[in-house]
Amino acid sequence: MEKSVLIIDDDKWIVMSTQMWLESEGFKVVTALNGADGQQVAKNAHPSIILLDIMMPGIDGWETLERLKSDAATADIPVIIFTGRESQQGETKSKTLGAVAYLRKPFRPELIVETIRHTLEARQAVSS
């Protein structure tokens, strides 16, 4: 089964570069440039995992995460926060709201791939 990743980030360069890296690693990638669109894409595409930025105009990542986790259609999709904010408080909040990991920008692309694979393998082990 092909693994898909939804990237929700308002920075087009980050979206494009992360998408290229993930596709080169064999993932199918869908993207959204804001939280509202990201929530809709998550419902329609039902990706294997979501990479979510926090600092976005309009609906920020925190509210997007809360909406994703409170919607039965998207609640089971694991979410990895990736953000430029370096904060222990943010990491704690992300876990409280249901995110599976908290990665800080700038990040090594290998770290994202490793985190995605680890998360998906752990989920598969639990569901088998």
Image: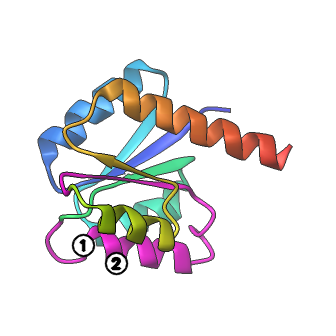
Residue 50 place in picture, x, y as percent: 45, 52
Left or right: residue 98 versus residue 123 is left
Image quadrant where one finds the N terminus: top right
Q: Give the residue drawn at x 32%, y 27%.
A: 109
* Residue 52 vertical placement versus 71 (above, below): above
Q: Which residue is mark 1?
A: 60
Residue at 24 percent of width and 76 percent of height:
59
Q: Position of residue 92 (x, y in %)?
A: 41, 67
- Find out whether residue 79 is within the magenta segment: yes
Where residue 64 appears, x then y in whole percent? 36, 72
4 is higher (above) or lower (below) than 88: above
User: Could you tell me which residue is drawn at 28 percent across and 28 percent down?
Assistant: 108
Check if mark 2's residue and mark 1's residue have beta carbons within 8 Å.
Answer: yes
- Name the mark on residue 4: none
Query: On the picture, is 111 further left or further right than 34?
Result: right
Depth check, front residue: 96 or 109: 96
Residue 14 shows in the view: yes
Residue that label 2 marks: 63
